[in-house]
Image: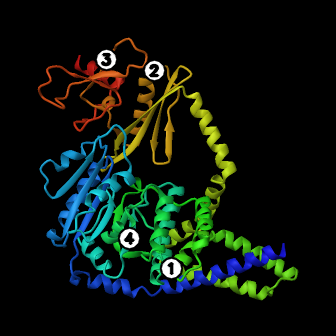
Amino acid sequence: MEYILDLLYIYIAVYSVYFLVLAVRNLKDKPFKIEKRYAQYEEKDHLAVVIYSHNNKSTLESLINQLKLQDYPIDCFKVFVILDNCNDGSEIIFDTNRFVNVINFKENNTLGKDQAVSLLVEQLTPDQWINSYIFIDATRSISTDFLSTVNSALVKNSVLSGETLMMTDNLDIIDSIKAIYLKYHMNFIRKARTLLGLSVQADSGLFIIKKEIVDKIGGIDFKNIDSELKYSLLLSKIGFRCAYNPNIQTFVNAEGYIFRRPRLSQRLKLFVNCLKGIFTKNFIFTEHVFSLIAPNFWVLVIAYLGLMKHSYRYYFFVDFKVVLFTFILLISGFAISLINSKLNLKEIVLLCFYPIYSIGHIIKNLPPIRNIITKISDGRAASEKDKLSIDVVVSTGKSELPCKLEFISDKELSKVRFIFKNKRYTTGCHLRMIDALQELKSKLDDYGFILKICNCCSHFTSNVDGSTNMLKGTCSCEYPSPSLKEPKPTLVWNSCTKFSPARLNNLIEEMVSKGQDN
């Protein structure tokens, strides 16, 4: 037991010193400010901007317009847009637009960012004109000096990520805590690590890399957050660390951002797998491997309290005062880290709750508990005899959000499940599917959201065909061709680019209106 406590103290004491060094180094970020000032004067590289989009029409159009307004020479960059099985009419944006090279994947299933981007990169490999790739999600927005800033940052670094700025006003408490931690992590951990010459994790939402490196590795890996972590380690191993640059900024609505972090089990697995390769002269890779086991802040505090109690009462290989001193170093490091992290008082308070959320998240994802949750979910899924998943779009009035609908038949009753990111809403059980859909529609209407499917469209007319669920109808819009001589058959969950919100039918209002007319 004593040996375990000794090793535990050495581990947290080393991390406390490391944390303090990061905090002090983060105070001196003058190199970024100088680089920003002289960004316009760097020699211009040839850049390939690769945008991935899956039903992000409104934000995609805005991003394309922002690229047209860049202060970067237009003959020094090309724009490639990947439309991954979009059903929101995104391709219409580019009907007469020669500024953009469109790659439209129209299949029954969505390819996903990793496969879609990999296919494009494979096509661009022979293109010797390109110096660097900029991979960016269609949900992002940029300023007019974005490309100039990226070009300047590429002078000193071959692989880059940037700062993600988002609005947190309409987030619930959990998402607010995660958003504040993301802001703190970027403006402290990532920035300080880069200033120290260490590597950070790649972010597929905005990822910049020189083409020669992609050609050397053989591609990119954006499958999920865990694969991005592996890819970052690979870059460190071959001598191309991923650096963070706060000058490279993208803006995103909170609705369009997915909070992700590699699971603890995955980080531990990677750490074990990489242990054999750490005995090299490549310090960047060795440090990157050990950063995988960085502890949670509250875990550190709890460990220190336990060790201080133990060293005060019993014999320990270091004196109680030494344990107390390293604990003070940790607290001092945290206080200093807040100075240049761009957080206000309210955000600092929310940040203090992140370790509590993190511990809960870790417990939830422990293999035994995760297995129990999976079995319960599978049990629920098994009771749902028929389930149909549909990709849909919800309009907020300002933007369009990609969501999913699940039409479920459960014990001869019907219900509809609405899924947005990791949030779900399931209607009550109804005799008819159309009634369950109506409940969901009313729920979304209460929040000012419009479900852009045929059932909510003014061109749609339901067919009374004798079926229980009443899922069939007709579309009176002249789409896709004006040559149609009669309404086109359709289903309640279909969608098209000619969507027009239907007026809410209120029986009482109609009766009152008729009474006034009489």
Nearer to me, 293 or 345: 293
**Which residue bears the numbered disc 3?**
463
Rounded to the nearest angstrom, the CA distance separating label 4 from label 3 is: 52 Å
- Identify the residue at horizontal 27%, vertical 57% (top origin): 123
Q: Is residue 280 above or below residue 66?
A: below
Residue 380 in the figure: left or right of residue 235:
right
Q: Left of 68 or right of it: where is 116?
A: right
Q: Secondary structure at mark 4?
A: strand
Residue 284's mark?
1
Q: Residues within 10 Å of mark 3 (few under 14, many from 20)?
A: some
Residue 46 x %, y %: 22, 71
Give amino acid for label 4. Gly
Image coordinates of residue 188 in percent, x first then y, are: 49, 76
Q: How is the image coloured?
A: rainbow
Q: Quadrant of the N terminus?
A: bottom right
The quarter of the picture where residue 481 lies is top left
Query: What residue is shown with label 2?
Result: 432
Of tags 4 and 3, the one toward the viewer is 4
Q: Which mark is residue 162?
A: 4
Residue 132 is situated, as x and y percent measured from the top left of the image, at 28, 70
Frontmost of labels 2 and 1 is 1
Mark 1 or mark 3, which has the lower sequence index?
1
Q: Is residue 302 among the parts visible in the rendering? A: yes
Q: Could you tell me how far apart the alpha carbons at marks 1 and 3 are, in whole angstroms? A: 65 Å
Q: Residue reaching furthest right?
A: 314
Is 171 on the left-hand or right-hand side of 275?
left
At label 3, which amino acid type do we have?
Asn
